[in-house]
Image (cartoon, rainbow, N blue to C red):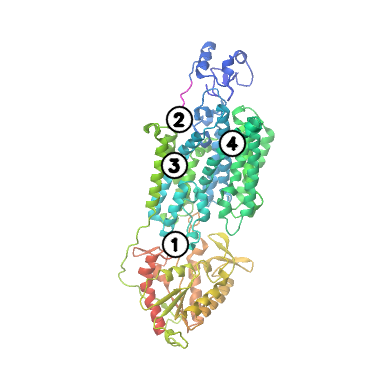
Amino acid sequence: MQGGRRVGRGTKRVAGTGQARAGSGRGNGPLEKNRPASLIHARAGAREVRAHRRRTGTGTRTEPRKRAGDRYPERGGRGPRTGEARDRPSMSAQAQEGTRPGEPVFQYRPALDGVRAFAVAGVVLFHAGVPGIPGGFLGVDVFFVLSGFLITSLLLAEHDKHGRISLSGFWARRARRLLPALLVLLIAVVIAGQFLLPTVELRLLRGDGLSALVYVANWRMIYRGAGNYFAQTSAPSPLQHTWSLGIEEQFYLVWPLIVVGALGWLATRHGGTRRGRVMLLALTLAGVGASSYAASQLFDPTNLNRVYFGTDSRAQALLIGCALALLLGLAGSSARHTGPRQVHPTLGALAILAAAGLGWMLTNAAGTSAWLYRSGGLTLAAVAVAVILAHAVVSPNSPTARLLALPPLVWLGRISYGVYLWHWPLFQFVNAERTGLSGPSLLGLRLGLVLVIPIASYLAIEQPIRRGRWLRRIPRLAPAGTAVLAVLATAVVVVVATIPTPARNTALKTPPNPVFSPGTTGTATPRTPPPMRRSGRRPGAQPRIDFFGDSVSWTIGSYLPDEPGVDVHTRAIEGCGITTQSDILELGSPHSLYPYCPSWPSRWQQGVDADDPDVSVILLNRWELMDAKLGGKYTHVGKPDFDAYLTGQLDRAVTIAGSRGARVVLLTAAYTHRAERPDGGLYDEDQPSRVDAWNRDLRAETARHPDNTMVLDLNRLVCPSGTYIDSVNGLQVRSDGLHFTPEGVRQLIAPWLIPQLTAIASKGMP
């Protein structure tokens, strides 16, 4: 029988020893004393076990047929029903890894699936915006610790059984376990992205998908869109979460090589396998220290991507799991040698303290907390997870193990890989804008999909491949080739599906009526000569138009079609408005302005001096709408203190833009939908009330300077219904909820704007 199975009536097999206990398993009976030596030997065969049963009358049950699906306990392989755990030890990994009966192997523990359940629940609820768990992202570190522990335990167990480690076999098992579900996810995401993502983000998705396919997504997310402002400020990738899979797969590639080297070369040169494991443990602990140090040095509050996504700074959690497996093995207390009745009160007390500390982190930590990186917070979190794991493994009858082995947790743990894979893209695509839902109703829909789709993936894709149902249809020598072809086919789909669909020309029935607001008078009586006839103008027969402002203004100035007889220059600064308050809240999180933004006055002035424009167009549609720290507290447009500050900045902007006699045109800010909160609501800077407050400030500015300023109502043009829309008459106008598309500028905005600007330049009025 397998280690841990019953041996007839009144006896129990002791896990991983080939021995049996009489009665309840607490004492030694006659059967124990008279057991043949062949059955005590670790390599006793199933035939001898059955023969002994027939001689002693202890039963004739034969060995259960091993199933290909009963493999890979490190990823939730099949084990006993949780309700049986108290009566007998769990199914050992010998069936799961295809080993012979009687061999000592790493034993499956339902509690480990419970750990997975807590980890994935923390991540999902954190991304869902459920209040109270700002540190739910630490669930990824829980996965890392568990992976390091299980993979190292399996490698050591294989070395114990065979005296060697099959690297090709290990990597093949990893590929069978992880690759199929990932390929399906990538195909689904890129196809959905073709219909749901704007052009900029669709192009980025191609690189995201290919990076995820070869498991380097974490480095992709660090440098994604480098040098391109619109790529850097685009919405998070639907594949952003694959960064953690990249780190794990890099670990799966490198760590077995290190283990093989330590147990082979080092052990041979320095005397014995145990010596090799001691040296491997020392190397692992050194790696933990190096990774923790890297995190402290790489932390940059203005750019967390490097420290958060970096393999070097996040490897510490994986290595702490590896160290735990080595420690348990060296101490002789690993799960494969431990009886279910052993108690470890000291470790239990430490597990309680670790759970309390981890709970505090989950409810108090934030991804931007400096102490996580500079003060070893990530290291402490991983150590806490390791302590809980250790207690659950060496004391399988402890309260810790029993809690983690509750059936709902075990069930969620078994599908945790699929839940993690699918939850993030589902949250990105199933949003309030598309469903019309928000709050609890949106959360319920998302969580329902996050369970249904992974269950389908588990039953239809993951389990059949793990059990070999699909593999039986493939020639014996073809699985590797099939895997390569599947990867290549997925890569082709990723590339083809992310080719943007060419924008179609949409003929508007009638040009929109000009919307002209000179101050608050509603009349147009210029008191100065038209800009093209002003004194001191630089010679030139064409109207000269300059665009100033932020990246939204940049999209208009840059995407305008070439107009004969009009000279257009774009002097807008991507990422900068006219506010110089460095501490802001962007999408609900603290951020700082780009370091070059405070120099906007001098850069605007340089543009005016170089171009001598007849009309200076100012469009500001983002930074002035965010919360900014003023006088030590956050405030925003619409509040008297911040409105007073913005009035001063607007006066300065108008003065610079009109310093050579140009007429200054202020375009109203349009309603935006840049991103949604996790609950489906709008972030503060996207609230229509803030846009309205800012546009009132613009009109107040023209009232103070009626001779050289006027307002054109861009908001009414692109949001004719009075609310945010991304398309007008079937033409997509917004690319990401904020910026304008090239086709939107050329087909909608330009026919409305250019005639008015040229009329202002030549006549003084639109």
Instruction: First in sequence, mark 2 or 3: give its number.
Output: 2
Q: Position of residue 395 (x, y in %)?
A: 63, 31
Picture quarter with the C terminus: bottom left
In magenta, the rendered stretch is 63-68
Q: Position of residue 597 (x, y in %)?
A: 56, 69
Instruction: First in sequence, mark 1 or 4: give its number.
Output: 4
Instruction: First in sequence, mark 1 or 3: give its number.
Output: 3
Q: CA distance from mark 1 to mark 3?
A: 31 Å
Q: Residue at x 49, y 32 (%)?
A: 71
User: Alpha-carbon neighbours of circle 1 within 10 Å: few (<14), some, or many (≥20)?
Assistant: some
Q: Position of residue 117 (x, y in %)?
A: 53, 40
> Which residue type carries mark 4?
Gly
Secondary structure beneath dot 4 equals helix
Instruction: Tell me, for residue 737, which label it has, or none.
Output: 1
Q: Position of residue 34 (x, y in %)?
A: 60, 12
> Which residue type carries mark 3?
Ala
On screen, 17 above or below 632? above
Instruction: First in sequence, mark 2 or 1: give its number.
Output: 2
